[in-house]
Amino acid sequence: MLRHGDADFILPDSARQLSAKGKSQVVKMAQTYSRNVQDIELVITSPLRRALETTELFIANANIGCDYQVADYLLPDTSVTAVARHIQALVQKKILMVGHLPLLDYWIDYLTGNANVRMATASLASLSMDYAYKGLASLNWVYHVD
């Protein structure tokens, strides 16, 4: 999972774009940890502008060899059970989800049974599981950038 980079504070929320700091965060994360994401088979992103920009920058700078899909179920206030229904239907094993708070924090807690992880801007987290359901995942690592 990848949280979008730092974003400008403007309204409406859907129009918020990455700040210069946010772009730098995403590029740094992608370049530093590209080896950890080389086997990604599918990238799914929120439709909000800051998430789309994060997705495009991350894919380009981490040299991920797949396109991305836009999914409304990755909007910030979506329920984790709604996300689970969509993710359980996917056949890909290695998925990168790009989204927002509070959803990403809730999603990690749901999958791990409450790992109590907090995703800062441009944070990247890895979980392992055989099936996307409550309490069945292990948290492998979380990386943060300045």
Image (spheres, rainbow, N blue to C red):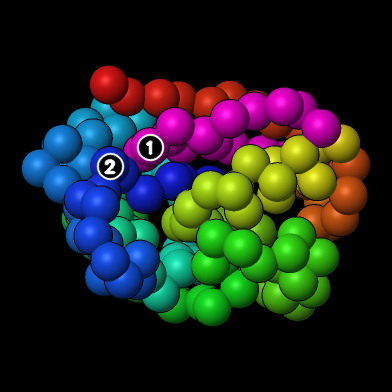
Q: Position of residue 122 (x, y in %)?
A: 36, 38
Which region is colored magenta? 114-128
Residue placed most toward the observer, 16 or 81: 16
Is residue 106 rendered to the left or right of residue 131?
left
Give the amino acid type for the residue marked by disc 1 in the picture: Thr
State the residue at coordinates (79%, 45%).
Answer: 111
Is residue 54 rendered to the left or right of residue 40?
left
**Residue neighbourhood size for the residue with mark 2, other residues' Cα within 10 Å, grouped as few (<14), some (14–19), many (≥20):** many
Instruction: Say whether residue 63 is visible.
Output: no
Q: Position of residue 94 (x, y in %)?
A: 58, 55
Mark 1–mark 2 CB contact (< 8 Å): yes
Instruction: Say whether residue 138 is visible.
Output: yes
Is residue 135 rendered to the left or right of residue 64?
right
Task: Pick whichever of labels 1 and 2 is earlier in the sequence.
Answer: 2
Q: Quadrant of residue 5?
A: top left
Residue placed most toward the observer, 140 or 77: 77
Residue placed most toward the observer, 31 or 107: 107
State the residue at coordinates (76%, 28%).
Answer: 115
Q: Position of residue 76 (x, y in %)?
A: 55, 60
The disc placed on residue 121 is: 1
SS for dot 1: loop
Indicate whether residue 117 is drawn in magenta: yes
Q: Pointer 2: what residue?
A: 6
Q: Quarter of the image containing the C terminus?
A: top left
Query: From mark 1 to mark 2, how far is it between C-alphas?
Result: 6 Å
Indicate whether residue 110 is drawn in magenta: no
